[in-house]
Every structure is written in C-alpha cells, then in structure tokens.
Amino acid sequence: MRDVVVIGGGLSGLAAGYELEKRGARYTVIEVKARFGGAIHTLPAAGFLMDGAAFAFRRLSDEALLQELGLRRQQVEIADGIAVFAHGTKTLLDALASRLHGGRLLRMAVSSIGVWRGRFSICLENGMVLDAGAIIIAAPARYAARMLYNLAPAAAECLSRFRYDSILRLSLGYKKCELPADIATLADAACRFIFATDAPARLPSADYRLLQVGLRAADGASPQAMLAAARKRFGMSRPPAAWRSHQWAEADLLCPRDSKHAAAMRRIRAQLPAGISLIGSDYLPPAPQEAGIARLQERLDAGRAAAHDAIAFYQRRRR
Ligand SMILES: Cc1cc2nc3c(=O)[nH]c(=O)nc-3n(C[C@H](O)[C@H](O)[C@H](O)COP(=O)(O)OP(=O)(O)OC[C@H]3O[C@@H](n4cnc5c(N)ncnc54)[C@H](O)[C@@H]3O)c2cc1C
C-alpha cells in the first residue's frame, strides 16, 4: 500500500519524489517513457552537449538543495542571474532520479484515476491497478485531462482546452569566429530567444560555442528549413559544426500570458477531489516575459510543496 503516487517523471514529478523519499513516505513515481526526465534531456552531438528543452535558466537559489544533490559547482552563469548546467540540464534530473529509492515504474502509462473505499485507485494502461492515499499529477494538461475524465469531468474539460505556442529550439554548435560578435541583439519577434555558452564540458574545444535559439515555427516548416532561415537571418555563412532541433507540442503554454489563466487554474483545482494535486509547467502562475529562460527553481519548489501537502493529507485521513 502506497501513501502517495506521483504520475509523471519529469522535473516536477522527480522533485516531488525526492521530497517524499526524504520524508520517508511510501511512494511510487510512474513514468510512461523508458527514462526519467520528461521534456528535459541532454544529448551529445559531435563533441557538444545539447539540451533538448530547458537550456538557460534563472540561477537556482536553493543552496541547501544544490548541496544535497552535489550540484553546487554545476551552474555556469551566462548572463546576469541566468545560468546553464556545466554538463547539461539533465544533470539536475539525473541527480534527483538517482536519489529515489522508493517505487519507480517506468514504461507505464496511467490511463485513469478513480476512488474506491476512501482511497484512490490508479489504473495503468496494462491493466494494473495501484492504490494510494494521495496523488500528485505531474504531467502536462492534456494527459492530466485524460486521467481525470471520469473522476473530475469539469476539470478535465478545462485542462483539455489548454493551448500551446509552436517554438522550435535549435541547438547550434559553431566556431566562435563564424558567429556575430553580440548574439544577444539578434532576438526579435520571430527569434524568441537566443542564448550561448562557452562551458568547456559542452564543447569539443575552446574554439567553439554552443547556442540555443528559439524560433517561432511556421506551420509545416521542416527543421532544415528553419535552420536555413536562422542562418540567413543571423548572417552565418557556414553551416554549424553540429545541430539538433527540438519541438514538442507542450513546450510553450500560451494561456499563462492570458489574465484568465490564473482564475481557470483556481477553478480546476477547486474541482479536483481533495488529495489530488496538479504540478508542472502547465500549472504555474503567469511568468514574467522571460522568453526561453526556464524556471527550474519554481518547478522544484512546486514539486516539493506538493509532496508536503500530500503527506499532510493522508496523515490527516489516517487519524
Ligand atoms: C522542446 C521543449 C523546450 C522547452 N523549453 C523550455 C524553456 O526554454 N524554458 C522553460 O522554462 N521550459 C521549457 N520547456 C518546458 C519544460 O517542459 C519544462 O522546463 C520542464 O521540463 C517541465 O517539467 P515537468 O515535470 O513539469 O513536465 P514534463 O517534463 O513534461 O514531464 C511530464 C512527464 O509526465 C509523463 N507522462 C505524461 N503522461 C503520462 C501518463 N499518462 N502516465 C505516466 N507518465 C506520464 C511524461 O512522459 C513526462 O515525462 C520546454 C519543453 C520542451 C518539450
């Protein structure tokens, strides 16, 4: 019997799992993919270490947590208050995942959630059913909507209406001498953001620089076409030494910029049964206009707070 089930093994779910582990709770983190990390992953390409999703982030401020995770020296500042990880953002996810010694289920998708005799039942697509005293859903809105369809149809309906922007992330490895001197000035309406790092572990040699560019993707445009457009726009006559593109439907939520989103989130939360919480990118309060700068600390804080609330909930129920 579990105290808490966490659905989704991205940054938010792992942060929740980490806190449950520290607090000695009986928990299981369920992740549909074969690896933990969710949207965040770091991949090698011709001597570069490229990030699939969050690359540049507002510097993590929780020194105690960084110490616990052995990451105090891993943040490399690239601009005022903005950092990258020396070995890629995956470093943070790996550090959290390696500390989860409770239940971990990979390659298991949650299909629906129900209630049975005062406890939650979590149905997996393979027919398995788990029970739990509390649930933390750490999956994007459209997946959460499917899980909640029977239990909380009004909330599921609202979640299924979330809309996303289509920003393509291009990671580009270039020789420094082939790049414009001040890349920060290149950002405009179509190029949502551009960040660069010279962190040695992420480059084949000190002659190179790694960039991540966020481009609003035209409908149907291929990554190759977007790369060609980016090169033309930035005046890079030579092709990059290495590149990767990353696009994912849920990368950029549109509604946090909508003033009605906070109210919609309050309604959704009010429609959920007590003991179920929603955490993750899709549910954070509106962000200041900081295109491309990941808010990792907020996701960690939200995951850990949800773990505290879940423990408090099932302890109250048990009394
Ligand atoms: C290409 C891309 C670029 C991004 N760039 C940025 C950026 O520049 N800045 C920024 O702040 N954020 C960015 N993001 C958002 C990014 O998602 C967050 O930074 C962070 O990774 C969110 O973590 P999360 O745990 O909330 O969600 P996710 O990482 O999406 O994790 C959710 C997890 O739930 C799992 N899951 C879903 N359904 C089920 C199910 N039914 N059963 C079990 N598991 C399930 C998924 O497989 C996934 O692992 C980007 C995302 C993408 C995809």
Image (tube, rainbow, N blue to C red):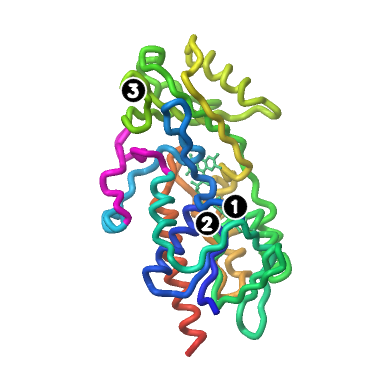
Where residue 96 sits in the image (x, y, percent)? 41, 56
Please name the residue that numbered disc 3 is placed on: 205
Where residue 112 sits in the image (x, y, percent)? 69, 66
Question: Looking at numbered disc 3 in the image, what kind of residue is underneath it?
Answer: Ser
Q: Mark 2: is the Cβ under 8 angstroms from ligand 1?
A: yes
Residue drawn 58% across the image and 45% down it: 253
Where residue 46 sits in the image (x, y, percent)? 46, 25
- Nearer the observer: mark 2 or 3; the answer is 3
- Nearer the observer: mark 2 or 1; the answer is 1
Residue drawn 36% across the image and 12% down it: 177
**Mark 2 or mark 1, which has the lower sequence index?**
2
Q: Secondary structure at mark 3?
A: loop
Question: Looking at numbered disc 2 in the image, what kind of residue is underneath it?
Answer: Gly
Q: Secondary structure at mark 1?
A: loop
Find the magenta span and give its range: 69-89
Q: Which mark is residue 33?
A: 1
Residue 87, image quadrant: top left
Please name the residue that numbered disc 2 is placed on: 9
Residue sitting nearer the eye, 129 or 267: 129
Determine contact: label 2, label 1, CB under 8 Å: yes
Where residue 81 sits in the image (x, y, percent)? 31, 40
Question: Looking at numbered disc 1 in the image, what kind of residue is underneath it?
Answer: Lys
Q: Is residue 111 above or below residue 256?
A: below
Alpha carbon distance from label 2 to label 3:
34 Å
Residue drawn 65% across the image and 50% down it: 162
Q: Which mark is residue 178?
A: none
Position of 261 with respect to 291 (left or right) is right
Q: Secondary structure at mark 2?
A: loop
